[in-house]
Amino acid sequence: MSSRLTQAASLTRVIIKHGGKRLLLASLASVCLLLCGRPSVAQSLTDKLSAEDPANLAAEARASGNIVRGAILFHQGNINCAKCHRPTAASERLGPDLSRIEPTATDAYLIESILQPSKSIKAGFESSMLLTKEGQVYSGIILREDAEQITIRDVKNLDQPFTVQRANVDELKPATVSSMPANLADELKDRQQFLDLLRYVMDLKERGPEETAQPTASVVRELAPELHGLVEIQRRNCIACHGADDSAVNLTPKKAPDLNWSGRNLNPEWMERFIRDPHLVKPGTTMPTMVSANHEDRSQIATAITHFLVGKSGNQFTAQAIDANAAASGKELFHTVGCVACHVPRNQDGSERPLADSQALGDLSTKYNVTALVEFLEDPVRVRASGHMPNMRLTHREAIDIANFLLQSTPTVVATWELDPDLAEAGRSLFVQNNCHQCHKDVVEAIEPARKYITLDQANPTHGCLSQTAGDWPDFSLSDLERTNIRAALASLSTELTPAQRIDVSLQSFNCLACHERDQLGGVSSLRNPHFQTTNLNLGEQGRIPPRLTGVGAKLKPQWLREVLVTGRTIRPYMKTRMPQYGVENIEHLIDLFQTVDQLPETKFAEFHEPEVVRKKGLELAGTNGLNCVSCHTYQYKLSDTMPAVDLTEMADRLEKDWFYQYMLAPQKFSPNTVMPSFWPRGVAVRKDLEGSAEEQIEALWQYLLDGRQAPMPQGVVREPLRIVVAEEAQMLRRSYPGIGKRGIGVGYPGGVNLAFDAEQLRLHALWTGGFADPGGVWTGQGAGNVHPLGRPIEFSKGPDLDDQQRPWIVDEGRPPQHQFQGYLLDDAQRPTFRYVFDSVEVQDYFQEAIDESNQQTHLRRTLILHSPNGRKQLRFRIASADRIVKHDQDYAVGDRLKVRLLTEQQPVIVTSESNGQSLELHFDLPAGDGAAHGLAEKQATKLVIEYRWEAKQ
Amino acid sequence: MTTYLKLIYWTMLWLTPQQEPLGEYWGTAEAEAKYYKLVDIPLPKELSIEAGSFEVMPDQKQLAIATRRGDIFLVDGAFDAHPEPTFKTYASGLDEVFGMAYRDGSFYLTQQTEVTRVTDTNHDGRADRFDTLSDRWGFRNYHEFSFGSKPDLEGNIWVALCLSESYNSKVPFRGWCLKITPDGRTIPVCSGIRSPCGIGPNEHGVMFYAESQGPWNGSCSLKVLEPGGFMGHPISYNWYELAPEMGPAPSEPNTPSRLEIERKRVKELVPYAVVFPYIRMGRSISGFMVDQTGGKFGPFENQIFIGDFSLGVVMRATTEKVNGVWQGACYPFREGFDTGLLAVQFTPNGSLIAGGTNRGWPVRGPKAYAVQRLDWTGLVPFEIKEIQARPTGFELTFTKPVDRAVASHPEVYQLKTFTHIYHEGYGSPEVDQTVPIATKAIVSNDGLKVELQVSGLMQGHVHDFYLPEMQSAEGEKLLHTSAYYTLNEIPDPSR
């Protein structure tokens, strides 16, 4: 759909460019046509339906329209009515909320509105057309307009309203056509789908409005200043110097970066600069400028400390070349996996595109080389235990790509840097004197701080580092807002936070709020929104925007929440942004907190007595003849046709039962972005199963889902057809084929000729033309089935082909006692030569495809080489068998589909058995041969060449 | 019981475990990760690599993977620190390969149908010669799975043959172990197998197999493939007539009974050597291999590492021969694999490759199939390294010196015992529970061993050790607090 929209839009522009604005309306009509897709060759579905009596259509919809199917149609595919009519915030809607249509609206009115939307347009939903001076055309609903600008929601791009300056508007006028495309019904497959959809729309109207989530999207919660301040205090680890006083109940020490790692891996030149002027080198850093107003002094101290750190760890920094290909893939990753949720997006050359509220990275290329940045990106929490830079679950390759992208502007010259041991020694003292060790542990032995500071509760909020003047204190370069917030926090330092506040603080501190919204706090900002992407547009916003955390503690089981937070488990393969990992110790407290804070109102569960029966009902409901969950949801890794919605077989592992109940009743209350329709709108079931009880239906689904991965497959999940495709080489599969025990060998030859050989009874079992085989029966489930030939096999009798003429083995399902399979050899095109033994006779049995020059048909040519060291008399070889075999010249017609010809000089006989039809056999004595079969001296081995051709008529 | 009732009974028992939850996690995955890190071996999207068997190629760089679908892939780069492996198809079209070794230029495969020698005679990187070494067993039902060992010191491949439908023995040698010699002779070894899922030598070079819970098997266990022995499931007695060198069929075991009682009646009956208590220690134990990496995999040199198909965990086991009978212990090791494990393989770098699929049976783990590698991080976890039986109790060895004060308290060692009903029904609850008392704990001078004297040892019972209070000299708690010793025999001090 989206590509068609784009196409439509660009086409429109072309028309306007050439024809001027008089063509505006005409071109818009063409937009609608294009939107509606199918060119109307014959009479369209819309035309046919329009010709029918609305009363009849309505009556029929009431009688045979399926609400469930209608609900799914309403929400998906090319028609996607929900896109415009979805009843969340009114401001988001392009079309009326169908549940709020006047009850007086007749069925005929509904039918007319679907088939001919422009005939009567509902007040408030008149669309406008806007032409800009650049020739851009927008058509849709005006959302806002004032003296300066006009904001319009365009049908072509519903997710992003366009704002146009009035000065730039060429023409604005009401449209005479509805923004709802005409001929939408043509997107439906057939008349029945229309009836289903109509039935659902009638139902929507009759039920009236549903309970929804937020009445207005505009209510946004802000974190209180004292909580913001707490986050600021925590980030700067104030308690490291200002004492962990008992009154600072909400603060814990922060783990500063591991300087042993920095000393080993970072560019020493950068370290010097950063220690000297942290806020210049990395704006926004929580590292303070040391207590020394004098730039000169700071410079000396920074140099000495750098020598100390580098000397301690042994620096490994060298300049490294950048891999341009890696950088190119790095760019894509950087902008999709979630880096830009906190950092600013970048141009192709790696330069930054400034964006407010971003974590600055500073000039990375003077800080890291590729090796160091890769090591950091692979596990940032190891280097910075605080977890504020989380682990993005990058593979080694991905880390390399992103590192190359970020370091593209690496200076080619790296100043040589010599370690000075004296300076390093001095640096050690300075490190302690400046209290660096209060935050950066594990660098020097634990010693007392060089200088004592007052505890936080004693702190004067206008003095020291909180004053706006420089002085005998470190400089944190605080903004006014930060200072205000910190003061607020200090004022309420001893007030213990509520669990809900602790959650808010953690979400703010780890910037979870950049991606997740919780209780109207945070969420994806409009500026970063485009960087949240999906692999499947059908899922709508839900497919790309990380889930809301509102009520998550009541939704997810603690074990699952732990897996998500700690081990990075994910169930949304379609979401390109990754859930990072913050380090167990930093984040695990949230699991309990969510559980404590998030509570659901009491749920009325259905009672049931026969779990087996209920579970079976649930299975039915999940399938196409029930609520059709599988039309959107994945079942056991098997994606649905439309979208890869969350796997049904993982639901019960993840979700709390009461949440499931309540969510099912009103999905949009919990997840405003969801494309999932409610099947129990206003608590009333749309289906009659289980006496139409919503609770019992939901319970049945839950009982079914409880089986998890073991839950049986609902109707409508189509196993992907498996095909073994034969191209230039033969394909082979040893497995069970119909009519053979378990020791079957199927071979598909180039040219579409195939056989099945029985390696237990040593016989050609079947021949077919066409595709080779479907291994679904043996490659899925436990493998209990057969390989299915993709053609109509011609089957031959059981029992070995080569046997004693007088006393052949009496055929049963077992194994002939004097026969032994020995294996096979493959030729250059993977064609097997089967090797087997009967008594003293060694056999090589080889098939090859061959093309008949006269009619270009492919057939099989079988070459057998038999020998026996002492000779073997009275052998019988069965070439083929059928109900009836007839000789025509050189050929033998075997049944009515096969023609067989012997190319060597032996004379076959047709043998009729009482029970088993006829067989074409050779009766012969094998002379003694020494077994040098490959050399093939004619006297020592016997050769048979047989052609199997299909009758032309088939 | 009438046949009809019996059928219902069996059907119910067979169905029941399918609907049980898969069981609680040990909950130790996060802590384990500090010592043993799981590394993904990325698999190409277009191939379904449902690993059934692994082998390291002679160049020590290439990994061979044989699959349920019937392919053999040669994989370069699987042992790299950050694997980005490349896959080449060496052979395909085979039938569920559950056994693979590479010797003298050829692969020796065990597939459903046969043991096959597979060779690339023209050295183009793809197999072109397939020699059937033995297909002497019957194969008429898909569930008649065949698991083959790597060759023993004489080059013999031992093949454990699952029962028909895992309940019957309808064609020759289902439920037997056969030994296939390098020249293709087939020698029956023992009867009474139910549903094997792994086969190979223990740490003393004696051939064992992994048996699954089911009829005549109260729980999963490792059993020794004793030549002439009977592994416990009598349905395969009818093939003694095809193996005259084995002598007459053993007498029928009574049902219901106890292994400890029946093994005195049925002299060929080999008791399970290491019981894996159901769910607590896996639900379908599978492929195993002994750590002979020379310490590269950590402190568990010469121990058995065994996977589980249902729960995606790897466990450890140790065995010893006491009064002529094999027995030993199992210990939790690492959970959190992505799929059901069928096979494990130590690499030249001393890592453990593990892989499998979730196809066909209930399996925990997020992926349909996967190959993963377990790397030792170099840190030694504080673990019960090994338990051995002693005439008056047990000797426990730890991976690190214990806190002498804590470890000297006998109460630190909480013991329970149980056994199973030995019967033709499916599985067994844990029965005949007792609570023995540790009376004295003597810590060795190096602090690594504790001699535990126990009052109330129960011959024939699994002894369940639980040491939540144990502490190392450095104050660490045990990474896993439980271990399970199967005490078939109490060592006779005079022997």
Image (cartoon, rainbow, N blue to C red):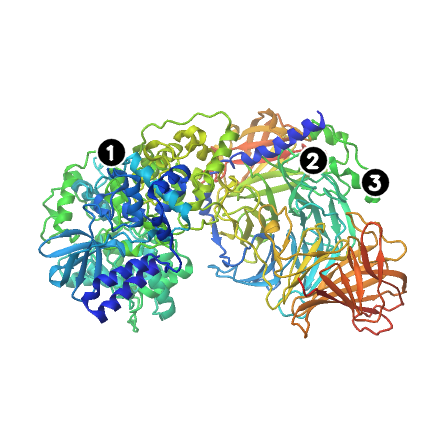
Q: Measured from the top left, where is residue A723 in percent x and y?
A: 57, 57
Label 3 secondary element? loop
The residue at the point 57 percent across, 25 percent down is B435
Residue matched to label 3:
B247
The residue at the point 78 percent across, 51 percent down is B186
Question: Closest to the observer: B58 or B397?
Answer: B58
Crowd class of label 2 (few under 14; some 14 to 19; many from 20; radius 10 Å) = many
**Which of pointers 1 and 2 indicates the residue nearer the eye?**
1
Q: Chain of mark 2?
A: B
Q: Are marks 1 and 2 on the same chain?
A: no
Residue matched to label 1:
A498
Residue matched to label 2:
B271
Q: Chain of mark 1?
A: A
- Quadrant position of the C terminus of chain A in the picture: bottom right
In the rendered structure, which amino acid carries the disc numbered 1? Thr
Q: Mark 2 or mark 3: which comes first in sequence?
A: 3
Crowd class of label 1 (few under 14; some 14 to 19; many from 20; radius 10 Å) = few
